[in-house]
Amino acid sequence: MPFREISAKMVQAEVTPGQRVFSQRGAMIAYKGEVSFTPNTRSGQGGVLSMIGRRVANEAAPLMTVEGSGQVWFGHGGHHVQVVELAGDTLYVEADRLLAFDGTLEQDTVFLGAQGGVRGVVRGQVTGQGLFTTSLRGTGGVAVMAHGGVLPLPVTPGRPVHVDPQAYVAHHGDVRNKLSTALGWRDMVGRGSGEAFQLELSGEGTVYVQASEEKL
Amino acid sequence: MFTLVAQFQLRGGKVLAVTLTGDTVKAKNGSMVAYDGRMAFKKLSGGGDGLRGMVTRRLTGEQMTVMEVKGEGTCYFADRASDLSLVRLDGETLHVESSNLLCAEGTLRTGTTFTGLRGASQGNGLFTTTVEGSGRAALMSDGQAVILRVTPGTPLQVDPGAYVAHTGGLRQELRGGVGFRTLLGEGSGEAFQIRFEGDGLVYVQPSERNTLGGDV
């Protein structure tokens, strides 16, 4: 477990030889020891297909590889940072929200249309995620950024959670999501409650929500 | 016959969790970030209830767009990562800037009052929102709000841009300190203050809105 939250907005990562950490480019604040930072010019993981995917989707949050031995501190834009520990499951997160993650995690770009066809595409547009999102699978830590702190909400069978698409940060576990609409005549005449679109998450897992409706 | 009471709880200082059992709360339009259970959202219009409220709304432009949330489950509210404070009312009146009110129990009555020049100096227009009755309300502020006590004989002066809300029997007046220095462009930036006298509580935020008086 290389990540430790040292304040609400900064994380510390232990880097040891042979163990890599990927981070968003420019997110390093300070480091101790012998540490090198190499930009990932090619999308390091996920093969050619996901590389093309990333190019097309503009889901190319530039990453860098952090290697060596020492400690590195990460933070970005004064945003709140939350460390999510993965134990063999998959975390779905928007690439701009990724601050840093364990090098052992398998990174991939997911076409939202693959999870629910046209609805998935529409959902991506509404949430501002675009057509693609990033998935991380394996065992290790991920540092995720959000505006105003992150609230984890458990999703259990029979008790789905509805989330405002703009406040959605990430989710993991065996969670299915779909876009539900509560469009009524009020929305048509411009008297809506501002909650016309919601993401419905059902299954078993956790969804992370931020205390704001602003994108990063 | 038992009464339904909504449970208000803060999560991490920036997210409000409200547990509903069939009762209603009023919340700022679009401030829902997530919910579980069943919820219905309906837009109300601010300024008070009934025909009189409607007329006041038209005249005052106190545009607090409110939605009514009704259902069973837990609903989470947050807005732009603002810091939240809970206020408990026992029959008294809370005066609050409409931009600082996040959520109030459905049993509380909301209305609009005229504030005159003071309102204009706060950068919030000539009218302010009042909340009366018994129940809980959640206030938003830029930075955690501080509660200052006013007792007879110890009046309090507040920067109009930092004022959030007040309760109790308080008289307020706007004080101007425009001198020849201000006219020469050498003002201290504290040309106006609101003076509170009487017995009550004033909520102040550690930040200042853009106000008319802030420039002089």
Image (cartoon, coloured by chain):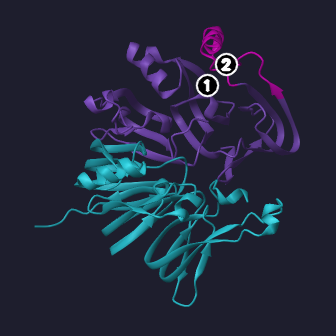
Chain colours: A purple, B cyan
Q: Residue at x 78, y 64 (%)?
A: B182
CB under 8 Å between callouts 2 and 1?
A: yes
Number of marks present in the image shown: 2
Give the distance between the C-alpha atoms of the residues marked 2 and 1, in whole angstroms: 7 Å
Upstream in the sequence, badge 2 or badge 1? 2
Q: Farthest left residue?
A: B1
Q: Residue at x 83, y 61 (%)?
A: B184
Q: Name the image quarter holding residue B163.
A: bottom right
Residue bearing mark 2: A45
What kind of element bears circle 2? Answer: loop
Q: Residue B94 at x, y = what percent?
A: 41, 69
Count residues near mark 2 (Cα–Cα under 10 Å), then give few for <14, some for 14-19, many for 20+: some
Do pointers 2 and 1 mark residues of a single chain? yes
Which quadrant is home to the C terminus of chain B? Answer: bottom right
- The chain holding disc 2 is A
The kind of residue tagged 1 is Glu
Residue bearing mark 1: A106
Say which of B107 and B37 sits in front.
Answer: B107
Magenta segment, which residues?
A38-61
From the viewer's perspective, tell me whether residue A206 is left or right of residue A2.
Answer: left
The kind of residue tagged 2 is Gln
From the viewer's perspective, tell me whether residue B130 is left or right of residue A151.
Answer: left
Is B44 situated above or below A204?
A: below
